[in-house]
Amino acid sequence: MLDLNELTIVKLGGSVITHKGSSPPAINQENLLRIAEELKASKESLIVILGGGAHGHQAAHAHGFGELSTPPEQLIRGIPSIRHNMSVLSLAVEEALNDAGGHGVVLPPFLMAALNNKKITSFQTSFIQEAIQSGFTVITHGDVCFDESLGASILSGDTIAVYLAKELRATSLYIGTDVDGVFEEDPKTNPEAVHIDIIDNTNITNVLSKAGPSNATDVTGGMKKKLEDLFTLTGLNVNIAIFNLGVSDRLSTLLSGKTPPCTTIRF
Ligand code: IP8
């Protein structure tokens, strides 16, 4: 493997960078411009991974992704519109980042990943490594990919984040969502929900038994799936945080090595 020095991976939750309820999909420019400025706080090599938000999830839902009975031909027919939407979103992020003085370049998973039954069977990370070595911030995103068994399936940005954290030995992985981290109940329906400051091997089983999926249009699983994916980083010493990307300065605080209100995870 190429030497990437210290590598940070940041997931930008789709509910923060897009207006998730908006149809046709719309980008949340105000948040995007702020986030592009905050990303400059990183001293390490950086991979930025976008969630699908309105752009990915609406189109995926419309083509029957997330329903077990959808035939492969119908899923495959959904590829162009999902790919188009995710390209629009990723180019907007690239533009915002580069306008803020960054050096972002988009590398779409559709061209790098192969799936079988929703699992990654191969992922060409050499392009990502080369781009980072050349001084770029790599921007990639949740995507639709060909799937050997299902025709096509959705590869979540969270799954990519964990996969790349393992493969490229990331030092830090920061998952930006629209809540302050992990709670014992859904903080959107219960404002009194208890926040979990730290998740480790002593409480993960208990936390997983309570965390639920995010909402009906989200075809890739929500907080529980995030935690299950993150649990596979056990023993790799990755500095993990789930934080509220919708609140100013939380991302830049993490990137400068401090801990804002969030859930930190140590496995
Ligand atoms: O929002 C989903 O990515 P996620 C990507 O990170 C698509 O789960 C295309 C729906």
Image (cartoon, rainbow, N blue to C red):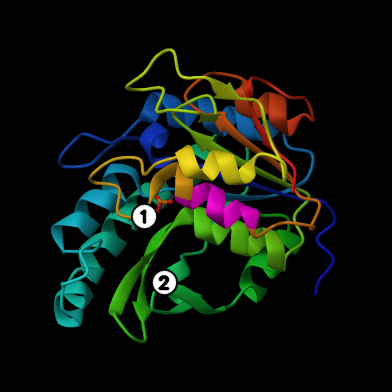
Name the image quarter holding the N terminus: bottom right
Dominant SS of magenta comes to helix
**At 36% from the left edge and 18% from the top edge, which residue is drawn?**
190
Whether residue 50 is visible to the viewer of this picture, yes or no, is: no
Q: Is 12 situated above or below 236?
A: above
Residue 185: x percent and y percent?
43, 28
Residue that numbered label 2 is attached to: 110
Mark 1 lies within 8 Å of ligand 1 (Cβ measured): yes
Mark 2 lies within 8 Å of ligand 1 (Cβ measured): no
Q: Nearer the viewer, residue 266 or 158?
A: 266
Q: Mark 2 and 1 residues: CB-CB less than 8 Å, in contact?
A: no
Residue 171: x percent and y percent?
78, 50
Look at the image and give the residue range highlighted in magenta.
225-231
**At 19% from the left edge and 56% from the top edge, which residue is drawn?**
61
Q: Say left or right for 95 vs 124.
A: left
Q: CA distance from mark 2 to mark 1?
A: 16 Å
The quadrant where ligand 1 appears is bottom left
Residue 231: x percent and y percent?
63, 54
Q: Say left or right for 62 vs 200.
A: left
Q: Secondary structure at mark 1?
A: loop
Q: Nearer the viewer, residue 231 or 208?
A: 208
| Amino acid at the residue labelled 1 | Thr
Q: Secondary structure at mark 2?
A: helix
Corner quadrant of residue 145: bottom left
Q: Nearer the viewer, mark 2 or mark 1?
A: 1
Residue 236: x percent and y percent?
79, 58
Residue that numbered label 1 is attached to: 220
The answer to whether residue 235 is magenta is no
| Amino acid at the residue labelled 2 | Phe
